[in-house]
Image (cartoon, rainbow, N blue to C red):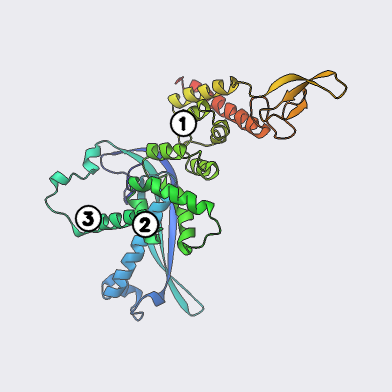
Amino acid sequence: MGNKVITTTTNSIQNAEIEIYLDLISTNVVIGTNLFSDFGASLTDLFGGFSDSYQNKLQKIYSMAIDNLKIKAANIGANAILGLKIDFDEISGKGKSMFMISAIGTAVVVKFTNESNFKSNIDSLAVVSNDQLEVELTRQSIISNFYGKILPSQDNWIFLFNNPIEEIAELLLDQYLYVYSNNNNNIYGETRDLFLANAPNYFNVINKETAINLLYKKIEEEPIPIIELIKKNKMFSPAKIIELIKADKLSNAIDCLSADKEYYSKDDLKLMMEIIILLEKLPSKGKIELVKTMLGKSKEKYICPIGHSNDVDEKYCLNCGLNINGISRTEVNRIEKFNVKVDSLLSIFNKDGQY
């Protein structure tokens, strides 16, 4: 997806074609009146322009609601929000008063018909606005913090989800794996929980190919958290799984079979069928051999890939659970489910006359 989530109150975006309608998303921001310095003003004053303090703070909360909505959109793979609506309500009860700001819109994936219209070209800039400068300063500050192993604040995360920085993706992943693995380490305080909650979603807002290459490259370092990230962000990659199988990283490859994609192409289906063929032709890592018993008689035994001896009728080793190809019963079940998924995709493409 793109670097930013675009928001509009209309149902379309100029020079953009809607590819996927994802979901209706909403968020609420509730604030107490004690946040305002001049509580004596009425709600009419808020919108009538009589109170600069109210206006400034409402503007910040308005921006917070939109930022929260953008994060939700980014987390489900959207790069735009259509039909944005903002409502302000006053909530009163038990002598207390609060304001609630609600934001709602439709999360979509759009494709721009003329990408150049949406890309900044430094050669064409005659001036740089203060807002542009502030964005770049914040960007450089966040990059510096990552190199210094300082975890992002809430404001930093809001910035990152709206202005993804691909060059920190590997640093962020390395830091995530470290924090994930050191569960009892409280040196980061509250920012640790914030980091663990937000970091997984970050890989869904940077370039998809960059994220996939990075995650599958690191899979051998920390398989459990990496595969969790792959599944959470729907980054199933049949090409990368084939690479894992050919590199004899069988367990990790099979674990990734249950990951999903947002959508599947005919090329994906071809690669998925190749995965099935590769798994069907796996070489034997164990063996059936004659073993002498205590009475001196020879008897066939199943020797698993680890070297455990079992009765020849045992399909899975009673010690380690592996079959002759080095696969567990759970992994075989996962492969069978993957085969069903491939059959289903093939059926869909055949119905549409696309395969």
**Residue of label 2:** 148
Q: Residue at 73% across / 35% down in the picture?
A: 319
- Residue type at tag 3: Gln
Query: Relative to residue 345, is residue 197 depicted above or below?
Result: below
**Residue of label 1:** 240
Describe the element under mark 3 as helix, strand or loop. helix
**Residue of label 3:** 132
Q: Are marks 3 and 1 in contact (CB under 8 Å)?
A: no
The Cα–Cα distance between marks 3 and 1, rounded to whole angstroms, is 38 Å
Ranked by sequence position, the earlier of labels 2 and 1 is: 2
The Cα–Cα distance between marks 2 and 1, rounded to whole angstroms, is 32 Å
- Residue type at tag 2: Gly
The Cα–Cα distance between marks 3 and 2, rounded to whole angstroms, is 24 Å
Describe the element under mark 2 as helix, strand or loop. loop
Q: Residue at 25% across / 54% down in the picture?
A: 136
Residue 129 seen anywhere in this rendered image of the structure: yes
